Amino acid sequence: GKTAAFLLGETGQVEGAIEVAGLVLDENGKKELATNWAVKRLFEHALKVTEGIEDARWQAWALSEIAEELAKVGMVEQAMETAERIEDAWRQARALSGIAVGMAKARMFEKAIETAERIEDAWRRARALREITVEMAKAGMFEQAMETAERIEDARVRAEALSGIAVEMAKAGMVEKAKKVFEQATKIAERIGDALVRGEALGGIAVEMAKA
């Protein structure tokens, strides 16, 4: 039964596969089928499968992965619409984070920041903004990257973002500027109250400095 649904999907018999999926696949199987089609850019069919997923958590997982795949191919509006349909807050945060990073990699920085700012989960929002700053730095947009890093509330993640910017500065031959940004990152890390987190943050900066 499960094999039949996948085989029908592989041979392009989409309607048949969706029908069989509804009859024989469990929630995980439907999620896998939806994700499989999203990876193949059969987004309409992938979304159709999610309609048959009754368990809210499995449906949220499927929609999250479809949203990320949509973002990867530049279908930003559709990705955002799909993310909006996710009821699970954690999964929605993950989807928005993936969309934001995808936008940044496509150098759609303004939209990437807007999307990241919509993430309610503070940790995921910080991580998304860190990824965006690094992509900006790779594009040579160092001033904008520094400004974006300032938006990161989490001290450890802000220090990581600054270290990433400094590495890209060093690669671009801006050695003195890179040293100053590393110093800035170190000062932020040294002010972290939790000794374990502080140690990990400083260790991470040391690793990045070695790269530069």
Image (spheres, rainbow, N blue to C red):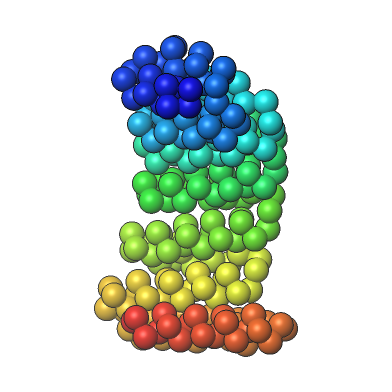
Q: In the picture provided, is 67 more to the left or to the right than 169?
A: right
- Asked whether 211 or 132 is in front, the reply is 211
Residue at 55% x, 49% y: name it. 97
Horizontal arrangement in the rendering, residue 199 relative to residue 204 (left or right): right
* Horizontal side, residue 88 vs residue 161: left or right: right
Of the pair 151 and 202, the residue shown nearer to us: 202
Find residue 122 and report its image quarter.
Answer: bottom right
Asked if residue 43 can be seen in this view, the reply is: no
The answer, for residue 173, to whether it is visible in the render is: yes
Give the vertical position of 61 relative to 154 (above or below). above
The residue at 31%/20% (across/down) is 11
The mark total stands at 0
Instruction: Tell me residue 44's x, y (percent).
Output: 46, 21
Q: In this view, does 105 lie above or below 165?
A: above
* Nearer to us in this view, 136 or 29: 29
**Residue 39, picture quadrant:** top left
- The image shows residue 152 at horizontal and vertical percentages of 61, 64
Give the residue drawn at x 72%, y 83%. Answer: 193
Q: Which of 32 and 119 is in front in this view?
A: 32
On-image quarter of the C terminus: bottom left
Task: Identify which residue is drawn at 48% across, 26% down.
Answer: 2
Q: In this view, does 155 lie above or below 42?
A: below
Return the x and y of residue 148 as percentages of the image width and height. Answer: 53, 61
Q: Residue furthest right?
A: 193
Question: Which residue is situated farthest in the front direction here?
Answer: 1
Corner quadrant of residue 8: top left
Where residue 197 sits in the image (x, y, percent)?
Answer: 64, 80
